Amino acid sequence: MNICGKIATFAKPQTVMRQLKKRRVTVSDLTGDNKKQTTMNILKLNNGKVELRKDSGSLIRTIGNGDVINADINNDGSLILVTTVKGKVELRKESGTLIRSIGNGDATNAKFSGSDILVTTAKGKTEVRKESGSLIRTI
C-alpha cells in the first residue's frame, strides 16, 4: 500500500493483498449548525474480488469474479471503479450494477479525480476521461 492511503495496485491477481480504503465526509444541515461526521463505505480487495464494507467492517456485498487488480470509490461513495486483469475498467454503482466499461482494454490502474477518471495504460500513459467514458486528454 502506498503512503497516501490509496489502494495499491499489482500486476498479478495472485499478489493482491488485503487493503482498505475509507473516506470521511463532514455533513451539515442547511443552517450549518449541527455538523456531524459520517463515514463512507470501505473497499477491500480480497482474492481478486472487491468487498464493499461498512465502516464497522461488516460486509455489504462482493463485486467481481476474482480477476480484479484495483478498485476505487468516488467521493460521495455512489460509484465504484474496478480494474480487471484483462485491462478492462468497469464503472459500477454502489449496488454493484455495471454502468459501463471505460477505455480500450489496456488499463493497469484507474481512479477518480474529482468527477473525472484517470486511467493508466499499459504503455505508461494516463488518460483523463469523463464518467461517460469519453476521452478528455492523454497525458
Image (cartoon, rainbow, N blue to C red):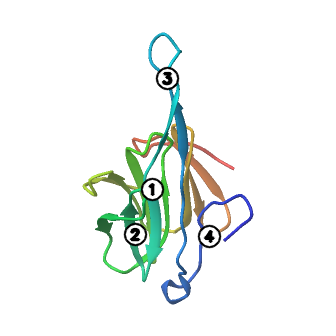
Calculate the distance from the C-alpha at mark 4 to the C-alpha at mark 2: 13 Å
User: 19 left or right of 46?
Assistant: right
The mark lying in front, picked from 3 and 4, is: 3
Q: Label 1 belongs to which residue?
A: 55
Instruction: Single out the residue that lies furthest toward the right.
Output: 3
Amino acid at circle 4: Ala
Residue at left 56%, top 38%?
A: 114
The mark lying in front, picked from 2 and 3, is: 3
Q: Label 3 belongs to which residue?
A: 28
Residue nearest the observer in this picture, 128 or 41: 41
The earlier-in-sequence mark between 2 and 3 is 3
Q: Label 2 belongs to which residue?
A: 50
Q: Are marks 4 and 2 in contact (CB under 8 Å)?
A: no
Q: Are marks 2 and 3 in contact (CB under 8 Å)?
A: no
Q: Label 4 belongs to which residue?
A: 8
Calculate the distance from the C-alpha at mark 1 to the C-alpha at mark 2: 15 Å
Q: Residues within 10 Å of mark 1 (few under 14, many from 20)?
A: some
Calculate the distance from the C-alpha at mark 2 to the C-alpha at mark 3: 31 Å
- Asked if 50 appears above or below 14 in the picture, the reply is above
Place of residue 40 in the rendered image (x, y in percent of width and height, measured from the top left): 45, 47
Place of residue 104 in the rendered image (x, y in percent of width and height, measured from the top left): 45, 61
The mark lying in front, picked from 1 and 2, is: 1
- Asked if 77 appears above or below 16 in the picture, the reply is above
